[in-house]
Amino acid sequence: MAEGSRRVSVTYKLTLLAFCAATIELRNFFTLGGLKTKDVYVVPFCSERILGVGNLFLCSVRVGMRRPYSAEHRLVDSCAFLYVQVVTNPNDDLSGIKARTTCQMQKKKSALSLLLLSVLLIFSCTAPVEDIPVGSISLDKPSLELQEGEVAQLKATVLPKNATDTQVTWSSSNPEVASVDKSGLVTALTPGFVTITAMAGQKTATCQVRVSKKQVPVSGITLDRYSLEMVEGESAKITATILPQNATNATVTWSSSDSNIAVVDADGNVTAVKVGSATITAKAEDKTASCTVKVSSSVIPVSSISLDKANVTVTEGESFRLVASVMPENATDKTVSWSSSDETLASVDQNGYVKALAAGVASITAQAGDKTASCMVTINQLHVSVGSIILNKTSLFLVEGDSETLVATVQPDNASNKTVTWSSSDESIATVNGQGKVTAVKEGYATITAKAEDKTAECQVTVSKREIPVSSIVLNTNNVEMIERESVRLVATVSPANATNASITWSSSNEAVATVDQQGLVTALKEGAADITAQAGDKTATCKVQVKPLVVSVTSIALNKTSLSLKEGESETLVATVSPDNATDKTVTWSSTNTSVATVDQSGRVTAIKEGTATITATAGDKSATCSVTVSKNVVAVTSIALNKTSLSLKEGESETLVAMVSPDNATDKTVTWSSTNTSVATVDASGRVTAIKEGTATITAKAGDKTATCAVTVKKKADSGQNENFEFEDWN
C-alpha cells in the first residue's frame, strides 16, 4: 500500500447479475472522513472463490450528488485489497459526505465459467440501491438583527427526512462581519451586512444578518471643578468629561438650582447674577455631577498694578512719563497716586510725569488701592561735548608688517565721553586697533582716522612692499548655532600679520542654508548645516554653522462665524484666521463636541448629521475658537433601490431570497415592498424570498419610496428524480 494511504473498514454488498447482465457488480455505501483529492481508500476482501484471480475490476465512486470519479483495480492474488483512488477538484470539501462505490468485473473467463458463477449465486441477485436526494432546506429565521458581540442560533430543516445525505454545511459571505460555526451558531463581530448560507446536498437556504454597533452607556460624568467663587456679573466655564470616552450618547445638559443667583448655558458657561449660592448640575443620560457656586458682592478690589518701565536712565534736566496698568480692568477704584523716594533728585506729578533734577538714584512709586509698583531712575550729570581731537602724527611711513601707535588727545579735559574710536580707510593697506596701533598690511596708501564723538583727526599712512607669505588663518570660532534670519560676523586672523597678501575670501558650502559676505558676515536663511570657509593665500579656516528654525508662536485664532444653523445632511465650510501671519505652525485642527449631531473635517467643512446642537472648535497651537452649530431635522428621500440579482433561475419548488439595498443610507423611510407580476409562476414574501411555483417567467419588483428595482425570474420544470445513471467500461484485454 502506497505511503500516505488510508485503510478503512468497508462492508460490500455483492450483487451478481446471473442472467440479466454479463458483469459482476460490487456496490457499497460509506461516509468519507477528511478525504482529500488523490487520497486512496483501500477496500480489503477475499473473493478468489467467486471472482477469480486476474479478473479486472472497473470501479466508480459517487460523492453525494456529484458526478462519479473513476478508479480501477485488478485482483492479483487470492486475498487482496481493492485500491480506490478518488481524484477530485482541489477546492472540494468532502468531509462527512456519503459516497457510493460500484465495481464491475469485466468478462474474461469463458461464458461457461460466468454461467457457473451466476448459478452458484443466483439467489443473491438484488436490485441496485439508489440515493434519496435532498429536496429542500429551510431556516427558522430569514433575517437577524444583532449587535457587536451577540450570538444567535439558526436551525435548518432538511426535507425529505429520509434523504441519503442530510449533512448541513454553514458559511458566511463575510466572516469579518459575522461568523457561523458548524452547528449554525452566528456570532456578530463588526457592523455591516452578511448572508449566512446553509447547504444540504445541492439545496441552500439563507439568512440576512445585519450587525449594528454596540451601544455604550454613560458610566459616569466628572467636572473640572466642584466649587466656584464668583463676583456679581462675572462669568466662568465648567468643563464636563463623559465616561467612558466612547459612550454612545455624550450629550450634556446643564441646569442651575437657582437661576436668580447663577445661570448656566448649554456649554457650561456660568454667569453670576446676584449674591447667594446655587448648584450647577451637569447631566449625561442618568449620570450627574454638581458644582457649588458662591456669588459675592460686585465691589472689585485692585489685584495688581504694573509700570511700563522698571528702570530708566536720564540726564539732569530731562523728563519722561511712566504709565501704570491697574488690574483687573473692572476694579472698583483704579485711582493711581504717585510719589518719589527723593524729591531733590526726581519729582513726579499725579499724571506720572517724572523730571530729573540732580545726579543720583531715586525710586518712583505708583499706588492703587493697597498695591504698588516702582521704577528705579538713574540720573546722570549733564553731558560735556568733545571740542576737538589731535593726533601726535599727521603722516606715517611703514613697511609691510611693521606697526606704530598713534596718540590721540581729546579736548576739553572734562569732556563727558573721551572714548576714541579708530578706523582705516583701507584695511587691506593698513589696520588700526582700539588703542591706535597702526599695522601695515600691504603696499599702498591709507588714512587712519581717530574719532571722539563727532570730532575727527587723520593720519596719512604710506606702506611700502614686503613679501611675506601667509602661514595660517584662524577664525574666532569653529562652530556657530544660529536661528533663521539671524546674522553673525566671523573674524578671521591671518598669520603672520604682515603677510604680503592677507586678503580674505569667504564662501559657504550651502548658500540655501547660510550665506557669507566678504566681510565675514554670516546670515542664516533656513534650517540646516553649512560650512563657512575663510581663505588667505593657500590657507583656509572653516566654521561649521548649524541653523535652527525660527519659531513664531500663534497668538490668536478667529472663525468667520461663531454660530451656524444647518439641516440634516447640509454642509458649510468655516474659515479660520490664524495670527500672526508669520506664525511658524499655522496648522488648524478641527473637532466637534458631538459628532452624532455634526462632524467637521480638517478643512473646516461642517456636516449636519442629525437634529441637535454641537460646538465646532478650531485649534492652532494653544489657541482655539468655537462655533455653535444647531442642526434641524431633514426628511431624506430614497434616491435609488438595487437588488443583489437582476435575474434568477429556479426549478419548481425552489426558493431564494433577494436582498434590496436602499440608498442613501440615511433615507427617512427605507421600507421595502415586494410584488410579482405572475404569482402563478413565482411568488415573493415581505422579506424578498422568491418561491418558484410552476414553469414560466415572472418579474419580481422591490419598491422603496417612489423607487423600484426588478429581477427577472425564470422557472424551469423540475427534473425527473427517478432517472438512473449507467456507466459503461471497455475491457482492458
Image (cartoon, rainbow, N blue to C red):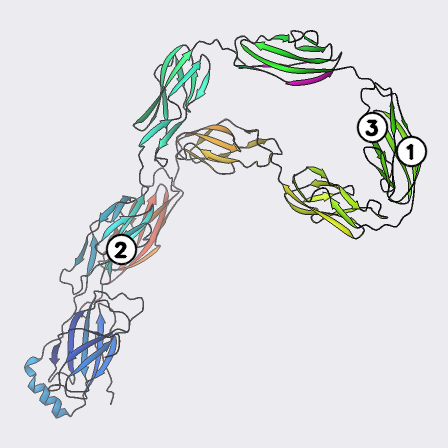
Residue 136, image x and y in percent? 20, 58
Q: Is residue 337 left or right of residue 454?
A: left
Disc 1: which residue: 459
Q: Work out how far the residue at label 3 is from the one at label 1, CA to CA, in angstroms.
A: 14 Å
Could you tell me the amino acid type at mark 1?
Cys
Dot 3: within a 10 Å radius of its alpha carbon, few (fewer than 14), some, or many (20 or more) residues? some
Is residue 21 visible to the viewer in this orientation of the structure?
A: yes
Report the mark closest to the observer, 3 or 2: 3
Residue 634, image x and y in percent? 40, 33
Say the numbered circle drawn on residue 197: 2
Q: Work out how far the residue at label 1 is from the one at label 2, CA to CA, in angstroms.
A: 109 Å
Counting residues from the start of the chain, the first of labels 1 and 2 encountered is 2
Counting residues from the start of the chain, the first of labels 3 and 2 encountered is 2
Magenta stretch contains residue 671: no
Q: Quadrant of residue 546?
A: top right
Disc 3: which residue: 420
Magenta stretch contains residue 315: yes
Badge 3 element? loop
Counting residues from the start of the chain, the first of labels 3 and 1 encountered is 3
